[in-house]
Image: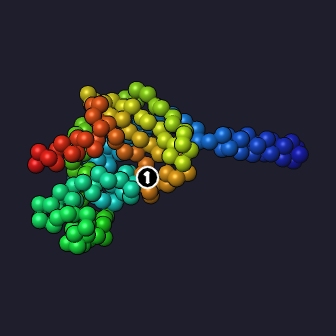
Amino acid sequence: MVRVLTIVVALATIVASEATASGPVQLSVQSAQEMVRSFLKMLAKPTPTLSDFMKWSGQNSEEEDAFAYQHCEQQGWIPPQSNDRCSAYDKARYTRAKTEASLYLRWLKTKLPSASQVTIAHIEHVTEPQEFAHDLIYARLDDVEVVFVHPFGPMQLPERAGRLYAIKINGARVPELIKKDLAAR
């Protein structure tokens, strides 16, 4: 009996290691739907914070900077990327990340519905280059089409690359939407 159990455990270990060696398993529709719902739940908070932003979008994301730089420009702290006052403003915001509102997430709340219906239309598993492997999640949130990225490659540690972030809304790239909205202010 012990010998049979040992063989079963050994086979299970081999199967598990082969599954791991072949790379991450593609995200299921159900898992993607749960992840998108969790993201929307965070977004529905009265004030999504910088901490929320970093958790979901990662520390390498430039969306938050675009809004912070606009604030700096409005204050006359030009150019924002090299202005000491702007750097101090930005540093102070991240020091209070758990309570400081995310300017980007506040903007994103205006673009996405609270989504009573989340439908995953398609998931594209992108494995090359391996360091930047990710899933593209094509979703419909009520009547809004959104493409999300879910990074999972070895260089895509959640604290650096985030867990899930929007890259397109109704076919328009998010950075272009941000640029257009900031120019209109």
Q: Quadrant of residue 66?
A: bottom left
- Residue located at (23% from left, 73% from top): 84
- Whether 138 is drawn above or below 18: the answer is above
- Whether 93 is drawn above or below 129: the answer is below
Q: Quadrant of residue 138?
A: top left
Tell which of 100 and 131 is nearer to you: 131
Q: Amino acid at mark 1?
A: Ala
Tell which of 45 and 127 is nearer to you: 127
Q: Measured from the top left, where is residue 65 in percent x and y?
A: 27, 57
Query: Seen in the image, is 179 located left or right of residue 52?
Result: left
Q: Residues within 10 Å of mark 1 (few under 14, many from 20)?
A: many
- Residue located at (37% from left, 29% from top): 119
Query: Seen in the image, is 33 located left or right of residue 128?
Result: left
In the rendered view of the protein, which quadrant contains the N terminus? top right
Q: Measured from the top left, where is residue 117 in percent x and y?
A: 31, 31
Q: Measured from the top left, where is residue 18 in percent x and y?
A: 71, 41
Circle 1: element type: helix
Tell which of 49 and 74 is nearer to you: 74
Q: Is residue 63 visible?
A: yes
Which residue, given by chain and number where applicable, does mark 1 sit on? 161
